[in-house]
Image (cartoon, rainbow, N blue to C red):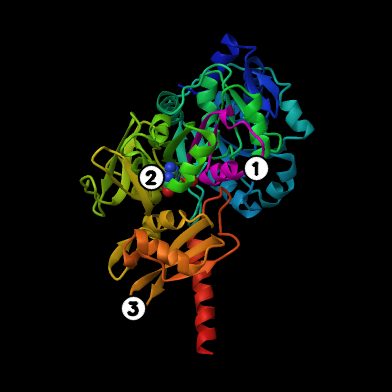
Amino acid sequence: MNIATWLEQAGRANPDAPAVGLGMRVAMDYATLAGRAARFASALRDRYGLVPGDRVALVTKNCPQFLEVLWGSWWAGCACVPVNAKLHGAEIGYILQRSGARICIAGGDLGDDVAAHAPVSLEALVRIDSADYARIFEADPIPCMPVAGSELAWLFFTSGTTGRPKGAMLTHDNLIAASYAYAAEVDPVRAGDATLLAAPMSHGAGLYIMAHVLGRGVSVVPESGGFEAGEIFALAAHWRNASMFAAPTMVKRLTAAREEADPSAFRTIVYGGAPMYVEDAVRALDRFGPCFAQIYGQGESPMTITRLTREEIGDRAHPRWRERLATAGVAYGNVEVAIADEAGRVLPPGEAGEIICRGAPVMPGYWQDGEATAKTLRDGWLFTGDVGSLDEFGYLSLKDRSKDLIISGGTNIYPREVEEVLLTHPDVREVSVIGRPDPEWGEIVIAYIVGEADAATLDALCLSQIARFKRPRHYRFVEALPKNNYGKILKTALREIDQRDSACNDAEEKG
Ligand code: AMP
């Protein structure tokens, strides 16, 4: 079935219920959102000549129009290609070309950049603040197009911490499965419950929209179009039962914010997308109380592989509480998770290997990339590229991406383990541990630190908690760590920086 059926139903059954918020006010009720999606679909078909299966690119920072374009594309039976507005024009151009999108809807401020990099395959570029965009909604509404659940709905370009982004094909069935899993196992959504869309809607946060339409919740876009701690506190206090998806860096900023705010205003803060260190989770719990849930997923299995529930995160009395806080929880009910060795054989509990999974949310493959699909989907399993292990209870510990693993003197060292220790120091704000090629050891451990602590203190801290061979040989104190547009630390870039710097230092030492 077409997932837009959910919106069609909501428009009929709950026309006056708030559907979209902008800042403190209701921007659209369900009748309006459904009506605009139906008109958008009509214009796609009759004015722009799109047919079911065609792609509609959407490049904008978070705004209410995102929702009408997303649902309107589905309503027409087309697929939507949301693109992160923070990407460079050339990167946006690449995604437009790769996806073969026939039309692109762009935020007003981005129109020139998109136009400058638009491929010839793009037939129309419509700016959200233009008369053309307004005219789209003068079209007569059409009924929601029937499409099979196996059809493409969302072409989800991976965040590309290495190489070119790949388009994970998410079908209507994948999105339905992910939304059901979220509502059943992370956070049920009831009429009027708000989700604050502060993280990019083109990515993780956007996937919460569907569960909220299903439950007749309100998708609230901050006026700033992004994440500002003060604004988030005000929105959480204003809207009922506010929840939000927040990357770990956002949770850290909310925890550290000095604003006078009612920390109990949040119903749920869902974190994921990058490692949440135990110390950071504990600080967040101290400030906000037990309102956290964790999810582990990736574009290829949208936000749905494992989850750690509010109860598990909040249950300080549990004998394994801290241990479990360091994990990403257990598999969702509609996903099987296992650990595989290099030959693809399933490993027993306790052994580390590549995390693999299969189930209803998993993509059928990458867009027009048979080679990448064959590498990633093998024997019905999705090979996530993440390294981890399952304990005897089924809790998944994420180690590091296989390429981030450090092998020193023939022994594996997981950077995350060292990072967890360093972060327990109160003057360490951020840390990233990498391997540097070394003629004697293969690799040696280097820690990049944002904060005021000194190397000797950190060395003593490591010696008190982890094996000697794991402790960093060198510390580098920096103002900031290289991050991508989603706030994920780019270890590949850090390794390059480190290579350059160490070459300079060596030259100085020799000179
Ligand atoms: P993306 O496909 O861009 O959303 O990135 C997905 C990747 O983010 C995963 O493959 C993991 O490496 C990482 N990730 C997602 N959720 C978590 C989590 N809860 N803890 C640690 N890393 C995560």
Per the image, the residue denoted by label 2 is: 326
**Residue type at tag 2:** Ala
- Compute the Cα span from label 3 to label 1: 48 Å
Secondary structure under badge 2? loop
| The C terminus lies in quadrant | bottom right
- Compute the Cα span from label 2 to label 1: 26 Å
**Please, is residue 26 above or below residue 287 in the view?**
above
Secondary structure under badge 3? loop
**Please, is residue 416 above or below residue 143 in the view?**
below
Residue 226 in the image, given as x and y percentages of width and height: 65, 40
The residue drawn where x is 40% and y is 27% is: 185
Secondary structure under badge 1? loop
Q: Nearer the viewer, residue 357 or 475?
A: 475
| 232 relative to 300 in the view: left or right | right
Region rendered in magenta: 244-272
Per the image, the residue denoted by label 1 is: 258
Q: Nearer the viewer, residue 22 or 318?
A: 318
| The N terminus lies in quadrant | top left
Callout 1: CB less than 8 Å from ligand 1: no
